[in-house]
Amino acid sequence: MAHKKTTSTSAKVLYRPVGILSGVLSGALAGIVFKQVWKKASPRSVDDAPSALQSEFPLWEILAAAALQGALYATIKALMERGGARVFERVVGEWPGD
């Protein structure tokens, strides 16, 4: 069973800039990773994934691109947030979440 860590209000406030920065960085990194993965996974040799309003792409391809993009974004965001929280805990001595 996981151990619940205590958090003070000041730790949550101090962590906000770290959380914002990790969110921005994770979004940028997820975009870069998605572009590279989509180039390999795409049935066509296109650089950009299709958007919902591009009629030349079939629905299955648009949905596949959206699902892949969402999964990569959520995974990278979770990794970055967790890593940032662990570094914060080592530096400050308190867990910033919960």
Image: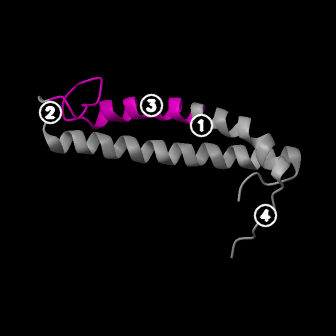
Residue at the bottom extreme, as displayed = 1
Q: Quadrant of residue 57?
A: top left
Q: Earlier in the sequence, mark 1 or mark 3?
A: 1
Marks 2 and 4, how far apart at CA = 48 Å
Q: Are marks 2 and 4 in contact (CB under 8 Å)?
A: no
Q: Earlier in the sequence, mark 3 or mark 2?
A: 3
Nearest-to-viewer mark from 2 and 1: 1
Marks 3 and 4, how far apart at CA = 32 Å
**Magenta-drawn stretch contains 47:** yes
Q: Earlier in the sequence, mark 4 or mark 1?
A: 4
Task: Residue 85 in the image: state x and y as whole percent.
Answer: 72, 48
Task: Residue 21 in the image: state x and y as whole percent.
Answer: 66, 32
Q: Earlier in the sequence, mark 2 or mark 1?
A: 1
Q: Residues within 10 Å of mark 4 (few under 14, many from 20)?
A: few
Helix, strand or loop status at disc 2: loop
Helix, strand or loop status at disc 1: helix
Nearest-to-viewer mark from 3 and 4: 4
Q: Is residue 15 left or right of residue 77?
A: right
> Which residue was labeled with disc 4?
5
> Which residue was labeled with disc 2?
57
> Which residue was labeled with disc 1?
23
> Which residue was labeled with disc 3?
31
Q: Residues within 10 Å of mark 2 (few under 14, many from 20)?
A: some
Amino acid under label 1? Gly
Q: Which region shows up in magenta?
A: 25-54
